[in-house]
Amino acid sequence: MIPFLKKNKDGKKPPKPTVPRTAQESIPFQRMFEDGTCRVRPGYYTRTIQYQDINYQLAQQEDKTAIFEEWCSFLNFFDSSIHFELSFVNTATDSADFEKSIRIPYQQDGFDDVRAEYSQMLRQQLSKGNNGLTKTKFLTYGIEGDSMAQVKPRLEHIQNDLMNNFHRLGVLAKPLDGTERLRLMHGMLNMDGANKFHFNWKDLVPSGLSVKDAIAPTALAFKNSRTFQMGGIFGAVSFLNITASDLSDQLLKDFLDMDSSQIVTMHIQSVDQNKAIKTIKHTITELDRSKIEEQKKAIRAGYDMDVLPSDLATYGRDAKALLKELQSQNERMFLVTFLVLNTGKTEQELETNVFQAVSIAQKHNCELCRLDFQQEQGLMSSLPLADCQIEIQRGLTTSSTAIFVPFTTQELFDNGKESLYYGLNALSNNLIMVDRKKLKNPNGLILGTPGSGKSFSAKREICNAFLVTDDDIIICDPEAEYAPLVERLHGQVIHISPASTQYINPMDINSNYSEEDNPLALKADFVLSLCELVVGGKEGLQPVEKTVIDRCVHVIYRKYFENPTPE
């Protein structure tokens, strides 16, 4: 899109837009407040909410339908006064830091060789995942207002409603404060990882710096119309031209599954319902007028007036169907701008990643077009500021917009000291690391068909718990298959069988034998049950025999409780 200057009514040219001379000037916001509110331009304020994933792709069909309908209701919450943006940020994490989080620390207890081997296995499993990409999702919304005091109550009200809507979907979400929003933008503008984020509100006044100095990249270079350089990486922004008649809920997932650092952004603006209906009615009127013109032409030319151009018939049918949806179904009209920012460490790697994204779009009958001469505007539109500088919009109804379901699969990665490895996520191949003791219900079951690896899974968890935690591990093993593992870990194996030399003493007792009841009464009950099992026969013990056994038990243990030493 080539900008042009229009003359004002008084004949003078408007002032030329200033070309940014620094990376800080390119970043399109004016002020960030500590509570997370950002003034993007005079009279426009935004906030950001980070939300987690839920299991959508692996869900049953009825669960998928329920999530989709709830997401449609979520989108219908936004009226035409709220601008909002969905951001999906895939950034490379520091692989050294990530490896450090799964490495098992040595304890100099004779098992460090096993710890080293287990850590090596975890590193191999880590490499099967998404190549160290951190995937985060954000919703940024903004409203117009004269001052911060005027918009703040409304921003809070919208935020509470959005949090409730996320809660209904079963999605964990949290609003970002000013520092967290700056850290997010710093990560997006410094994808090469060269600069670390250092920021403190107290340092702004003494240093004379602004918040933009904390997040700006070392340099932004827009040397040609199709790519740009941001610090040490190359980038290119494209927009998705939605030409498909039917969209799939796999489209967004396929973009997010790419193994490279990228930002996918959807700017969504709700259209006032009355205005949308009025526009479509006007379009139908225009189509009818064209239809009458064609019929007149047919009569003059002397052929059948029912023969109409196929496009005219198709557009008329689609427009009437759209009007019916807006009037009689729970549908709204949205204007959507879909942007994809691809990156690469070299120009060749960038072109490869862009080619992969283009292939994904083609697979879904859409077209990914490069933003020629608008790379800077595209980059700034990808920041979570709900400020779209690209004037390419596609009108979609609620259900068509909701087909870009922002949920794929929930990741389970608990970065705690005692987190244990449980396998790989079926969709993303990422590690599943959980500390079950922190969960509401810490119990676990291992289920599976014969030969699927239940015993191996149990042994791996036993080994992991032994190497990482100080927990006691007690195994009841009728098949005697865990003995070699316990012996390797220098545990104690107790064999109980008619031929073994190790026995259980049913007469053993101590002062902690019972927590609440009298220990003697509990032991008497146990001995009665044992005798009934051993010598009771069909009829069981007689009342006289029960009385004798009970009296004897009390006599036997009376001397012990007078001086309770094991000897």
Image: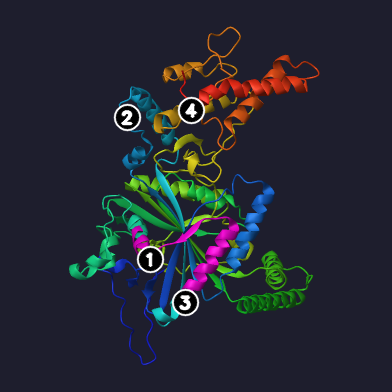
From the top left corner, tell me how far across and down residue 520 is, in percent: 59, 28
Q: Is residue 167 left or right of residue 35?
A: right
Residue at image x 76%, y 68%? 307
Residues at marks 1 and 3, CA–CA distance in whole angstroms? 31 Å
Start-end of magenta stretch: 154-183
> Circle 1 sits on which residue?
377
Disc nearer the start of the sequence (1/3): 3
Foreground tag (2 vs 1):
2
Q: Amino acid at mark 1?
A: Gln
Residue 144 visible in the picture: no
Please rate how many residues cluster around mark 4, counting C-alpha atoms within 10 Å: few if below 14, some from 14 to 19, many from 20. Answer: few
From the top left corner, tell me how far across and down residue 404 is, in percent: 56, 57
From the top left corner, tell me how far across and down residue 492 is, in percent: 46, 18
Residues at marks 1 and 4, CA–CA distance in whole angstroms? 59 Å
Disc nearer the start of the sequence (1/4): 1
467 to 308, vertically: above or below: above
Q: Amino acid at mark 3?
A: Pro
> Circle 3 sits on which residue?
153
Secondary structure, mark 4, is loop
Residues at marks 2 and 1, CA–CA distance in whole angstroms? 54 Å
Foreground tag (1 vs 4):
4
> Circle 2 sits on which residue?
107
> Circle 4 sits on which residue?
473
Residue 558 visible in the picture: yes
30 to 104, vertically: above or below: below
Disc nearer the start of the sequence (4/2): 2
